[in-house]
Image: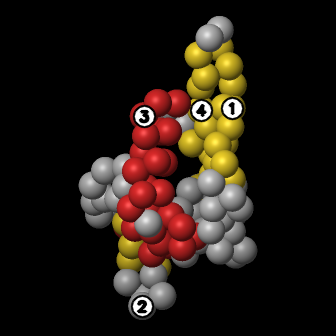
């Protein structure tokens, strides 16, 4: 894993760009501890190269940063579906508009 500061403000660094990880690496406790440490220290993480990360793995990785809870009522329409068809506590976001002008969240590639 390689991390570089995103921005230097005076003597302080803000954010970290993290590269060189595979989705399977993110499930390791030691990698999770290091990512959490970087997040606390730098405030923002940008992790590149995880195009193959599944929604289930995203939920597992998120647990390194704190408890993962279900989506609030009224937001379940935006939940990603796992491979078993069950809704996951991962909310799709986007800037796609329906013909009536309302926002539509959709999975990538849709």
Q: Secondary structure at mark 3?
A: helix
Q: Is residue 73 left or right of residue 41?
A: left
**Residue 79 visible in the picture:** no
Q: Residue sitting at 42 percent across and 57 percent down?
A: 30
Residue bearing mark 3:
40
For residue 54, above or below residue 72: below
Residue bearing mark 1:
6
Residue bearing mark 4:
15
Residue bearing mark 2:
84
Return the disc, 3 or 1, that comes first in the chain's sequence.
Answer: 1
Q: Residues within 10 Å of mark 1 (few under 14, many from 20)?
A: some
| Distance (Cα) linking label 4 and label 1 | 5 Å
Given the current orientation, which residue lies at the most extreme bottom position? 84
Return the disc, 4 or 1, that comes first in the chain's sequence.
Answer: 1
For residue 109, above or below residue 104: below
Asked whether 30 or 13 is in front, the reply is: 30
Contact between labelled residues 1 and 4, with CB atoms less than 8 Å apart: yes
Quadrant hosting residue 24: bottom right
Q: Is residue 21 left or right of residue 58?
A: right
Contact between labelled residues 4 and 2, with CB atoms less than 8 Å apart: no
Q: Position of residue 41 (x, y in %)?
A: 46, 30
For residue 78, above or below residue 47: below
């Amino acid at each position: 894993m390689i991390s570089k500061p995103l921005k230097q403000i005076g003597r302080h660094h803000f954010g970290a760009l993290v590269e060189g990880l595979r989705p399977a690496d993110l499930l390791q406790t030691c990698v999770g501890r290091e990512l959490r440490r970087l997040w606390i220290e730098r405030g923002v993480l940008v992790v590149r190269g995880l195009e193959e990360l599944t929604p289930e793995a995203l939920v597992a990785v998120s647990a390194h940063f704190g408890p993962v809870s279900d989506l609030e009522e009224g937001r379940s329409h935006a939940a990603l579906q796992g491979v078993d068809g069950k809704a996951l506590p991962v909310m799709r976001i986007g800037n796609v508009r329906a013909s009536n002008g309302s926002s539509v969240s959709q999975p990538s590639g849709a």
